[in-house]
Amino acid sequence: MPAATTTPAAADRPPATPAQASLYQQLRGHLAALKLHDAAEALPTVLDAAAAEGLTLTAALEQLLAIEVCATEARRLAGRLRFASLPTPATLEDFDYDAAPAADPKLIAELATCRYLENATNVLLIGPPGLGKTHLAVGLARKAAEAGYRTYFTTAADLAARCHRAAIEGRWATTMRFFNGPGLLVIDELGYLPLPAEAASALFQVISQRYLKTSIILTSNRGVGSWGEILGDTTVAAALLDRLLHRSVVLTLDGDSYRLRDHHARNDTLRATTTGTRQPLR
Ligand code: ADP
Ligand code: MG
């Protein structure tokens, strides 16, 4: 057996001297004190690999700290995604452009780079229900969280309800700070329900305080021309749109509802089979 070429397993190596064992314990203690728990856990494996492969001290340290950096980044991303409160697992990668001919893949690919967030550009997704507005908003929010942006997803109705409660409970300033915090705020479904005047002014305040500082993605089933109706006030609507559109990308989706596609396809199949098999009455 070519003993010289095989890697000795940790158990096969002679036991460490008491001095070495104590040094090892001290090192683990340092890592734990610095809360580098993943590095502490990986320490024996990295040390074994370093000994077996004859790694330099620099290479071994790099391996050890790379493990901690990776784990920290994964934890932070998980935290950002938890905070983002995305309502679905939708991603931009599973968006089907064949089913959405009005969606420009180049524009969406550009948005996926998150560059629009650097200069506080807003994104408006407009179109009838079922065309993938929420899907795209969730996909873009996910990209933003992955790129390190603090991201938060809400609906217009939820934002209005939270602001209403905050006003009653004397937490208005805190709530405004909360909606001002994220680098990207998604406000989904503006226009499904008409907003009371108080809600429209809360929305206006959120949009105003973020204006030219941080981005908003807003989805609506109504074209901007009818936002006066949604907001119950054309002056508020005009002022709100002014800020929202000043630096913005507007994606207008059009076509058949993706939700109803399967439904239509099933009906077509059903119709084809029933007409195909039915014998003419004589
Ligand atoms: P909207 O917000 O415009 O009403 P959604 O984004 O909620 O529409 O889309 C409805 C459903 O159809 C979701 O499950 C979504 O993932 C899916 N969907 C819509 N458009 C597409 C598409 N082009 N590719 C893949 N899935 C889509
Ligand atoms: Mg939607």
Image (cartoon, helix red, strand yellow):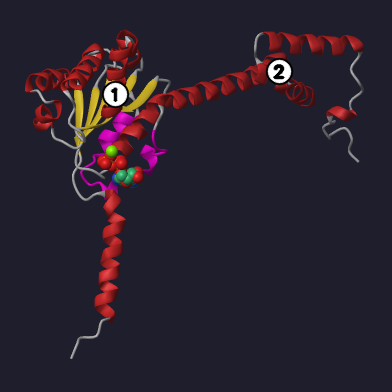
Residue displayed at 89% across by 17% down: 16
In the rendered image, which quarter contains the C terminus? bottom left
Which amino acid type is shown beneath numbered disc 1? Ala
For label 2, the residue is 40
- Label 1 CA crowd tier, 10 Å (few <14, some 14–19, many 20+): some
- The location of residue 256, given as percent across then percent down, is 21, 51
- Label 2 CA crowd tier, 10 Å (few <14, some 14–19, many 20+): many
- Horizontal side of 69 relative to 27 (left or right) equals left
Ligand 1: which quarter? top left
Residue displayed at 19% across by 42% down: 128
Question: Residue 161, labelled with which disc?
Answer: 1
Give the magenta part as a residue range. 87-112
How far is disc 2 from disc 1 in space, using C-alphas? Answer: 46 Å
Quarter of the rendering containing residue 7: top right
Answer whether residue 191 is visible to the viewer in this image. yes
Which amino acid type is shown beneath numbered disc 2? Ala
Quarter of the rendering containing residue 266: bottom left
- The location of residue 275, given as percent across then percent down, is 24, 77
In the image, 124 versus 84, the foreground residue is 84
Question: Residue 192, labelled with which disc?
Answer: none
Label 2 sits on a secondary structure element that is: helix
